[in-house]
Image: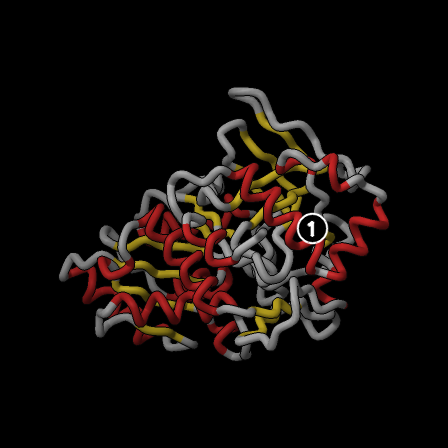
Amino acid sequence: MFSVPGFTAGLFSNNVNFDDLACRLFNYQYENNSLYHAYVEALKIPVASIKRAEDIPFLPIGFFKTQEVKTGRYKPQLIFESSGTTQTIQSRHYIKDSSLYEKSFRNGFERFYGNVKDYVVLGLLPSYLERENSSLVYMVNNMIQRSGHPESGFYLHAHDKLYYQVSGLEKEKKKTLLIGVTFALLDFMEKYTPPLEHTIVMETGGMKGRREEWTREEVHRFLKEKSGIKQVHSEYGMTELLSQAYSAGGGTFYTPPWMKIFMRDESDPLHLLPLPRSGSSQQGIINVIDLANIHSCAFIATDDAGKVFSDGSFQVSGRTDNSDLRGCSLMIP
């Protein structure tokens, strides 16, 4: 019998038995998610044959645009929507339990960066603050509140105020996290060149027609030259997932233990590529298992191209040709 409290009890620990939890969650979602059930049935995959995480069918991410992807029946506490453009249909993620999302992003951040209370958190997210139902704004807002520092906050277009704040924090040698969408960070750094020694600059992707597309290497080189930082950090997340991966530089992302990356064949979306051998990598289209997605679907076939390495880390090289431009998309190198 699947028990959500029992399942989540050790989900965010260091000792996650990924295959066991993934298979348990698959069976639960197959039985209680009508859309996913119908999809698995259409593929004619014998459920009894699924013994490992890589045996599990991945739901195309596009279903979040046209269907209510729910496991069980519930009235959502939150509905997250992708940014998209006026020409695209927005994805919707129906969140049954907001505390589950909070546990996921808090534990994920702490795993890589430590307690958020150690940081002043500055959010430079103009395009997201100007609309409702952004999972990124929800996460950063929670981090700002939990940081407990009076200097923490959002900045819409107030670059003068942000520069003043960052400069003061640097003088006081306070650990600071400046997290923002790519175009906003570029706009800020073009106008100001604050020397940063105690500040982590984290880009979340997102050009979305706001300015000429740059490669990630170009973006990072520019930000490093302007601020003097050694590395630009990155966050990989999306509306359809409750967990995030992080890069401490160079565009190589690492996942928390309850999230795992696989690669599928670009020419055959149902063919999962073998996991790379030690010291090697596998290139393809990214599939994600996010075990925090208990009440929607944990097994997502994204539209992101990239490669995964033998240690589970991965890189994103861009979007597939037939996918919509997303607000959190990453630049093609």
Q: Which residue is mark 1?
A: 303
Residue at (46% x, 62% y) in the render: 100
Above or below, 14 against 193 in this view is above
The image quadrant that residue 35 belongs to is: bottom right
Residue at (37% x, 44% y) in the render: 231
Dot 1 surroundings within 10 Å: few (below 14), some, or many (20 or more)? many
The percent position of residue 9, horizontal first and vertical second, equals: 42, 52
Direction top: furthest residue: 278
Q: Left of 141 or right of it: where is 320?
A: right
Residue at (70% x, 31% y) in the render: 273
Asked if residue 81 shows in the view, the reply is yes
Q: Quadrant of the C terminus?
A: top right
Amino acid at dot 1: Asp
Asked if residue 333 shows in the view, the reply is no
The percent position of residue 48, horizontal first and vertical second, equals: 74, 38
**Which residue occupies the foreground of this view, 241 or 32?**
32
> Mark 1: which secondary structure?
strand
Direction front: furthest residue: 1
Above or below, 252 against 6 in this view is above
Q: Left of 50 or right of it: where is 311?
A: left
